[in-house]
Image: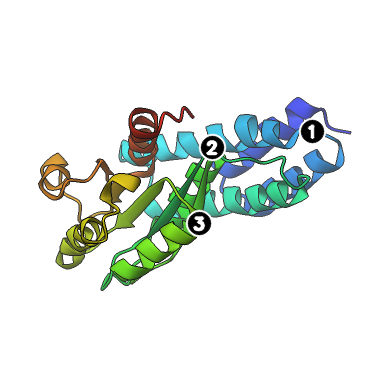
Amino acid sequence: MASKEEIINGMKDAIIAYDKAKCLELAKQGVAEGVKPLKLINDGLTPAIQELGEKFGRGELALPYLMVGAEGMQDALNFILESMPKGEYRPKAKMVLGSVKGDIHDLGISIVEAVFQANGIHIYNLGRDVPKEKFVQKAEEEGVDIIGTSALLTGTMFEQKVVIEFLKKQGLRDKYIYLIGGGACPSSEWCDEIGADGWATDVMLGLEAAKKALAEKKGIEL
């Protein structure tokens, strides 16, 4: 029988090796052998995906590999969360996330979902080509803290402004933290121009932006 440390370290190694099946197998083993679910998440899954995210940010890892690692983490994370008694997993914040209208790419959305959920931010993933009304409707329905919009294509970047202007029109701008990301998001200038609360072009920078905004605007510490 493997020790708790061996299971946790094995999960990390499996994600870094892009072995989705092994990671899920070890997650199941950990749950069966009584390893605390949050320990599996915080000590096993999170450090591994952070390492891959940092490598991607430094240009040492291609996006497809990062996506495979994130998928492996998400599969294991979903199993762990489903195994927990109802009410035991209490995310500290909630976020609506999706690619803006006209953007048919959802590359990176699953990565953000996996990393953010492992760090205490529950994600409502709306997928791609999401109209402004759907972002706001879901945010209102679920009582989220953050609305996050992604624009991978330069031609759809303006839709990030459309969403925030719609929030203002509805009198809801101050209710939500508004974060923007994606390959088309060029710099802090665009963030400042449209009045967003933070921006990022990769998942780890996005997580830091979310943490900073939650602390400053909501008093939520992750």
Taking the spot 67% from the left edge, 46% from the top edge, the residue there is: 23
Disc 1 and disc 2 in contact, CB within 8 angstroms: no
- Using the image, determine if residue 43 lies above or below residue 166: above
Q: Helix, strand or loop at disc 3?
A: helix
Which of the labelled discs sits on residue 142, or is there none? 3
Q: Nearer the viewer, residue 109 or 51?
A: 109
Q: CA distance from mark 3 to mark 1?
A: 31 Å
Is residue 84 toward the left or the right of residue 205 in the image? right
- Using the image, determine if residue 168 lies above or below residue 203: below
Mark 2 is surrounded, within 10 Å at the Cα level, by few (under 14), some (14 to 19) or many (20 or more) other residues, namely: some
Query: Residue 137, position in %: x, y?
Result: 40, 65
- Using the image, determine if residue 17 lies above or below residue 161: above
In which quadrant is the N terminus drawn? top right
Q: Nearer the viewer, residue 120 or 69?
A: 120
Q: Earlier in the sequence, mark 3 or mark 2?
A: 2
Which of the labelled discs sits on residue 92, or is there none? 2
Which of the labelled discs sits on residue 35, or is there none? 1
Query: Residue 115, position in %: x, y?
Result: 49, 43
Mark 3 is surrounded, within 10 Å at the Cα level, by few (under 14), some (14 to 19) or many (20 or more) other residues, namely: few
Q: Helix, strand or loop at disc 1?
A: loop
Query: Residue 188, position in %: x, y?
Result: 15, 40
Q: CA distance from mark 3 to mark 2?
A: 14 Å
Taking the spot 51% from the left edge, 39% from the top edge, the residue there is: 49
Taking the spot 42% from the left edge, 66% from the top edge, the residue there is: 127
Q: What kind of residue is marked 3? A: Glu
Q: Earlier in the sequence, mark 3 or mark 1?
A: 1
The residue mark sitting in front, 3 or 2, is 3
Q: What kind of residue is marked 1? A: Val
